[in-house]
């Protein structure tokens, strides 16, 4: 059978400097200069010359080829700017490739944002129909699934209230509910799972898994969350600098993605390329040190680790909840530390502030671990989130007191044990 | 067997160099979206104004009053045999519909940049929804106009109005106004997407355009040697036709009407080509 998606050396060039729409004034000036044969500005004679003027070419995608079989769930990973979003935009038909071609053999729906086209004045009911239609659903199809959508969104009695009166949680739940009930042959999803409170996120993941595995849909999934990629995708493609670095089994691709991460004692977070979409930077910098305050990024199980987070909050956060998750090279989350998972009570935070976490490194296997950081509050509002914000290395140690190696196959944590004849 | 294996739907994405691409089949698949957008625009517009639907009547009423005062009483411009308020309001019915379509539809790409960068659907649906949605406003204003005529008729002041079978042709005239305004909405959308500085010019242009169109003066006032100017204005004939058919007095020639219809279709074609060309990659420059 022919693959459901075939991309054949797709490239996309943006013209930097000249980016954005020009003005008629400039175009007329250019035209006049050319007519008079003025050589002040050497502009190539092409139909969109005005936008190319002074511009440098930027290859957002360069010769990207891949194919996807029907029913496959393929993850696209890579740092921001690697070309993932551009690729999704082309496959969703939002823009055209500069060269190359792609063939899609099925109806496509893309979910690059939750709640696209929601109108604040319209009720939840009206928005379900509008939003569904924008994403390509027929009216009858939406009507058929209406009750299911409302139930999934858990908004019950508010269905006829204008969505401008919804809480942000309700808004997001309704928006995702509509999207989750799309039934295209090809579904393109860009990190929208990272919405809502933790419980709703779990529900979304479950729904995604149903769509992907149960219903046999073809899904292209883009995320920085390696844990989600590992759980959902059978295959993954690593993009870097607009090119395919590696395409293959998910674990191998995640492994490669990890190896490109640097472990260092201090990491700038303000401009971090992995920040989840749509969030304003609250996390500015992360420092790792030992309990003595010595900067370090390499530890042995049992060591005390101190992580200092520099934050800036424009608004006061009353009940701040900050967590750091540790994910291994297979994309699996091994453990997490968080203020709400400790007996300590944090005061409300505001403005520039530092938070210090100190913990004992659990007996995990020697490897590189990526730190996923999230800042929310008690009401589930997300302020900041960076998957793979920094890396920490766990070294070989004599934790078990033996020279026998401890393989991954034996388990994820090492446990000291005593053996004797009873 | 090969046909059985390949799904019915196959979409090829590749750079379209030049060329005009438009898929009717796809357009029809999105007809529910068209309907919902029309509903959305109408509901949201009258929910946002304090006066609600009354605003739709209030606005031409006020303009008519100002015109009657300034152009009829002070400037003394004749409105022929028709009472000035009826003359102005009938012209404004057609003109407001036309101008509103262009004012809103002419900024399709700039007003919907966020939406267009997140989801694909045939972009032409957006200005089309505007043109169809404004028919609702036109209908409300027409009912109010009928009320105005009734008041004049009761006072015996409407003896010069002879509505006849031409009234039945009004839907066709409205259709021409719709296509023509859609054509300009498409052209302006394409141009403002490419040249941002044009969006300021659009509003100004439409305002001036009204004075070049027989709204405040009857075509009988135009000297014969300037008649070609009226024909060169694509909006003049349909607007005049609308008023003429409504009031039962028209002195348009059949040839003028045929020319105007051809011009409208031509402009629509140009609009579609320009619009589709820009639509393909407009989000890259947003």
Image: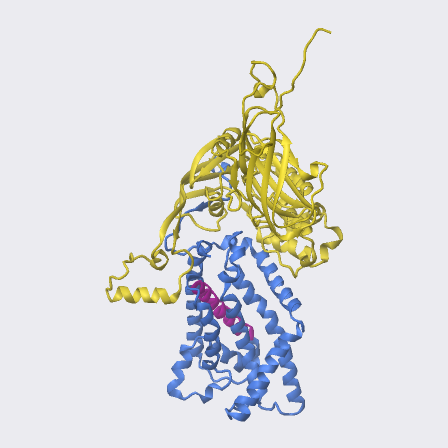
Chain colours: A yellow, B blue
Q: Horizontal and vertical percent for residue A303?
A: 60, 27
- Residue A297 seen in the current view: yes
Q: Residue at x 29, y 56 (%)?
A: A44
Tell me if A144 is positioned left or right of A242 in this view: right
Tell me if A154 is positioned left or right of B207 in this view: right
Q: Residue at x 57, y 34 (%)?
A: A293
Q: Horizontal and vertical percent for residue B162?
A: 58, 86
**The magenta stretch spans which residues?**
B169-192
Q: Residue at x 54, y 76 (%)?
A: B94
Tell me, yes or no, whether the highlighted magenta stretch contains residue B274.
Answer: no
Magenta: main secondary structure: helix
Residue B135, relative to residue A341: is it above or below? below
Residue B189, relative to residue B170: is it above or below? above
Q: Horizontal and vertical percent for residue B102?
A: 50, 69
- Residue A144 seen in the current view: no
Q: Horizontal and vertical percent for residue A9?
A: 39, 40
Residue A271, relative to residue B76: is it above or below? above
Tell me, yes or no, whether the highlighted magenta stretch contains residue B186.
Answer: yes
């Amino acid at each position: 059978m022919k693959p459901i998606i075939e991309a054949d050396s797709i490239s996309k060039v943006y013209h930097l400097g000249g980016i954005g729409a020009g003005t008629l004034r400039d175009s007329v000036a250019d035209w006049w200069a050319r007519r008079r044969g003025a050589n002040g500005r050497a502009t190539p004679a092409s139909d969109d010359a005005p936008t190319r003027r002074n511009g440098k070419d930027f290859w957002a995608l360069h010769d990207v080829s891949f194919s996807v079989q029907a029913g496959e769930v393929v993850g696209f990973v890579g740092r921001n700017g690697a070309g993932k979003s551009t690729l999704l935009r082309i496959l969703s038909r939002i823009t055209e490739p500069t060269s190359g071609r792609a063939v899609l053999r099925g109806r496509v729906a893309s979910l690059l944002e939750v709640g696209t086209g929601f109108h604040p004045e319209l009720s939840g009911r009206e928005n379900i129909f509008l939003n569904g239609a924008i994403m390509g659903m027929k009216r009858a199809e939406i009507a058929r699934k209406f009750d299911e959508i409302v139930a999934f969104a858990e908004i019950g009695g508010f269905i006829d209230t204008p969505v401008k009166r919804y809480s942000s949680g309700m808004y997001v739940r309704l928006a995702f509910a509509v999207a989750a009930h799309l039934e295209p042959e090809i579904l393109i999803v860009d990190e929208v799972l990272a919405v809502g409170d933790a419980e709703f996120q779990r529900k979304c993941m479950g729904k995604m898994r149903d769509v992907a595995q149960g219903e046999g849909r073809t899904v292209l999934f883009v995320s920085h969350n390696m844990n989600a990629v590992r759980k959902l995708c059978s295959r993954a493609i690593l993009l870097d600098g607009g090119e395919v670095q590696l395409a293959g089994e998910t674990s191998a691709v995640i492994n490669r993605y990890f190896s490109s991460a640097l472990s260092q004692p201090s990491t700038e977070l303000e401009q971090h390329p992995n920040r989840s979409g749509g969030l304003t930077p609250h996390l500015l910098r992360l420092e790792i040190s030992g309990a003595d305050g010595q900067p370090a990024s390499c530890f042995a199980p049992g060591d005390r680790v101190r992580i200092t987070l520099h934050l800036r909050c424009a608004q006061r956060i009353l009940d701040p909840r900050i967590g750091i998750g540790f994910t291994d090279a297979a994309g699996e989350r091994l453990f997490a530390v968080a203020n709400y998972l400790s007996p300590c009570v944090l005061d409300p935070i505001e403005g520039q502030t530092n938070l210090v976490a100190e913990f004992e490194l659990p007996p995990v296997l020697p490897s590189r671990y990526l730190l996923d950081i999230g800042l929310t509050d008690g009401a589930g509002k997300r302020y900041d989130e960076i998957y793979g914000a920094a890396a920490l290395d766990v070294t070989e140690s004599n934790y078990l007191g033996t020279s026998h190696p401890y393989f991954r196959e034996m388990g994820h944590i090492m446990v000291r044990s005593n053996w004797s004849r009873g | 067997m090969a046909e059985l294996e390949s799904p019915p739907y196959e979409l090829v994405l590749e750079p379209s160099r030049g060329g005009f691409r438009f898929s009717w089949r796809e357009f029809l698949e999105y007809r529910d979206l068209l309907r919902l957008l029309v509903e959305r625009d109408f509901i949201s517009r009258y929910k946002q104004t304090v006066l609600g639907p009354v605003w739709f009547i209030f606005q031409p009423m006020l303009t008519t009053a100002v015109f009657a005062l300034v152009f009829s009483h002070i400037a003394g411009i004749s409105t022929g045999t028709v009472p000035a308020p009826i003359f102005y309001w009938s012209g404004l019915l057609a003109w407001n519909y036309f101008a509103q379509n262009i004012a809103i539809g002419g900024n399709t790409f700039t007003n919907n940049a966020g939406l267009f960068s997140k989801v694909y659907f045939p972009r032409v649906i957006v200005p089309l929804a505007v043109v169809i949605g404004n028919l609702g406003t036109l209908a409300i204003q027409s009912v109010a106009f009928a009320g105005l005529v009734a008041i004049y008729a009761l006072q015996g002041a409407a003896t010069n109005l002879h509505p006849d079978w031409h009234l039945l042709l009004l839907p066709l005239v409205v259709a021409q106004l719709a296509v023509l305004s859609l054509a300009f909405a498409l052209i302006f959308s394409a141009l403002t997407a490419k040249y941002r500085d044009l969006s300021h010019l659009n509003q100004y242009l439409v305002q001036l355009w009204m004075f070049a169109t027989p709204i405040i003066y009857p075509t009988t006032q135009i000297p014969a040697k300037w008649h070609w100017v009226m024909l060169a204005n694509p909006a003049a004939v349909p607007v005049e036709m609308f008023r003429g058919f409504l009031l039962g007095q028209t002195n348009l020639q059949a040839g003028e009407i045929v020319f105007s219809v051809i011009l409208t279709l031509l402009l629509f074609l140009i609009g579609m080509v320009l619009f589709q060309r820009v639509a393909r990659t407009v989000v890259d420059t947003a």
